[in-house]
Image (cartoon, rainbow, N blue to C red):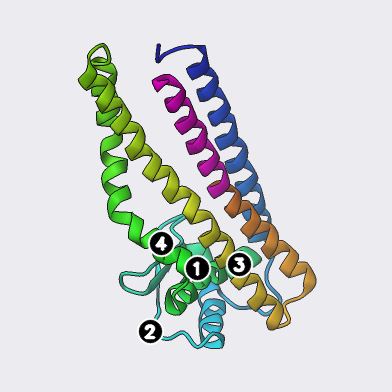
Amino acid sequence: MFFSYSYLLLIIVTTIIGIAAQTYVNRQINRYSRVPNQQGLSGVEAGSNMLAANGVQGVTFHQGGPNEDFFDPRNNSITLDPEAFSGRSITAYATACHEVGHACQHAQGYVPMKIRAALVPVVSFASNSWMIFLIVGIALYTIPLGRTLFSIAILLYAFAVLFELVTLPVEFNASHRGLAYMESVGLAEGERTGAFRVLRACALTYVAAALVSVLQLFWLLAQRN
């Protein structure tokens, strides 16, 4: 029932989506990591300027490990990977401004970010437990309890999918804020184009992840029916 050709097709399709998205992201990031921004600013300097331009205070910057770029609303801090932290490339500039976009969302009470934050406790439980319910549900599927557990697994996974869908407008808006700032400070059109390509590529990873999760959810629903 559960391990059919449709499941194999699902694995193939989702794997292709993931690989294609990551390949595109790496290509764009690496391409513009070699192109310096004409203002000569590091990621931290560009991000600090954007914070000041938006009147956002109290945000600290930290250097993280490779590919660690995120805003943490719990302590109002931005973590950037080494290249984005001290690098002076278009990629560093765009990455820092994107994360500052999240800090601005937090400071200004951006509604989708509030919704995502409210979902975190539920999603944390759901992400850690839905697979357990699924496995037990499959093992006991011939009895009513198994089918109930299987349905609970789908419900929990649906919360995780909802979280990924809510994340999309949060990420798109952060990039929009960053690009708007770059235009306002007179960043050259060619550099803005490069920054747009970098941020579009990064956004694609969220779109791909959401698409994969939605496909998996639909497949689970089809198995239940």
| Image position, residue 12 (x, y; %) | 55, 23
Q: Of discs 4 and 1, which sits in the foreground?
A: 4
Q: Earlier in the sequence, mark 4 or mark 1?
A: 1
Q: Is residue 18 above or below residue 6?
A: below
| Image position, residue 139 (x, y; %) | 25, 16
Q: CA distance from mark 4 to mark 1?
A: 18 Å
Residue at the spot of label 4: 115
Q: Secondary structure at mark 4?
A: helix
Q: Secondary structure at mark 1?
A: helix
- Front residue of 57 and 133: 133
Does the magenta segment cover residue 221? yes
Label 1 Cα neighbours within 10 Å, binned few <14 / some 14-19 / many ≥20: many
Residue at the spot of label 3: 94
Q: Which residues are magenta?
A: 206-225
At label 2, the amino acid type is Gly
Q: CA distance from mark 1 to mark 2?
A: 15 Å
Q: Earlier in the sequence, mark 3 or mark 2?
A: 2
Q: Are marks 3 and 1 in contact (CB under 8 Å)?
A: no
At label 4, the amino acid type is Ile
Residue at the spot of label 2: 58
Q: CA distance from mark 3 to mark 4?
A: 25 Å
Q: Place residue 41 in its image quadrant.
A: bottom right
Q: Is residue 216 left or right of residue 38?
A: left
Q: Is the N terminus in the top left, top right, bottom left or bottom right quadrant?
A: top left
Q: Are marks 1 and 2 in contact (CB under 8 Å)?
A: no
